[in-house]
Amino acid sequence: MRLINSKPSRPVALLLAALPFVVVCVIYSISSELRLAVNPQDRLLPAPATIWDTAIRLFTEPERRSGQILLWRDTGASLFRLLSGVAIAAALSLVLGVLIGLLPYMRRTLSDFVAVLSMVPPLALLPILFIMFGLGELSKIVLIVIGTAPVMTRDMAQRVIEIPREQIIKAQTLGASSLVIALRVVLPQILPRLISNVRLSLGTAWLFLIAAEAVASELGLGYRIFLVRRFLAMDIILTYVIWITLLAFLLDWMLRALSRRAFRWAEASL
C-alpha cells in the first residue's frame, strides 16, 4: 500500500496530533531543568511547576488594589477588540467581495485599490490611527480591520469570479435580478469560504491586537505581557502566551464547528 493511501485510525490520529505538543513540553522541561541546575535563580525558563502555580494565581486571585482578577479583565478587553475587528472585517470583505466579483464596474473601480491596500503594512499605520482615532478602543479595532479586511476581500472576490458562469446565466434566464443572483446564487456558495477566511485571519488579528495593546493601552492581554517584560516575569508572560494560544484555538474550533454544522455540503466536498 502506498503511503498516500494510508490513513491512521482515530486512536493513532489522536496520538499523532498530541505528539508534537508532548515533544515541545519535554524539550522545554529538560531545558528548564538544565538551566535551573546551573542557576536556581534563572528566570528565563521557569519550571513547569512554577508556570502552573502562577497560572492558578492569575486565574483565581484578585488584585489587592482593584479587587478584580486582572487576567479575566484583560481577556474580556482583548476579546472585545478582537471579535469586533474581525466581525467588521468579515462583513466588509463579504460585501465588497460580492460586489467586486459579480459586478464588472465595481471590479474595475475597486479591485486594484483593494489589492494595493492589502500590501500596506498595517503596523506602519498604527501611529496615524492613534492620531486620528485616539488611544481608545476604536484605533485598535480599526487596525484589525485594516490588517485583515483587504486580504479577505481579495479572496472573496476571487471565489465569486470562480463561480461557474453557467449558474449566473441560468439564473438570469429564469428572470433573476442582480440582487437575487447575489443572494440566492453567490452568497450560499461563498459563506463557507468566509468562515475559512476568518479562521485564517485570526492569527493575524491577534498579532495586530497585541501590537496595538503593547503601544497604547491600560488593559488587555498584550498590554499585560509588555508591562511585566521589564521585570523578566517569564512565568507570567508564558501563562499569558499559553492562554492567548488556547483562546485562539477555541475560536478556531468554534468557527470550524459552525462551518460543519451550517454548511455540511461544503465540508463533505473537501
Image (cartoon, grey):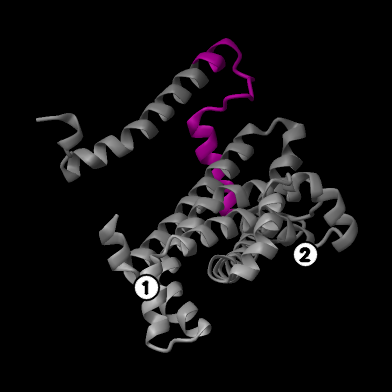
Q: Quadrant of the C terminus?
A: bottom left
Q: Which mark is residue 167?
A: 1
Residue 252 pos. (x, y %): 45, 55
Where disc 2 sits, the SS reads helix
- Residue drawn at x 85%, y 63% is 133
Callout 1, which amino acid?
A: Gln
Tag count in the figure? Answer: 2
Of residue 93 and residue 202, the one placed in the foreground of this image is: 93
> Pointer 2: what residue?
138
Where disc 1 sits, the SS reads helix
Residue 239 pos. (x, y %): 57, 41
Q: Residues within 10 Å of mark 1 (few under 14, many from 20)?
A: few
Of residue 197 and residue 225, the one placed in the foreground of this image is: 197
Q: Label 1 to label 2, Cα distance in Å?
A: 41 Å
Residue 187 among those drawn in magenta:
no
Residue furthest toward the top?
Answer: 38
Residue 4 pos. (x, y %): 20, 34
- Magenta span of residues: 34-60
Callout 2, which amino acid?
A: Leu
Q: Which mark is residue 235?
A: none
Which secondary structure type mostly characterizes the magenta part of the structure?
A: helix
Q: Which of marks 1 and 2 is nearer the N terminus?
A: 2
Q: Quadrant of the N terminus?
A: top left
Residue 56 among those drawn in magenta:
yes
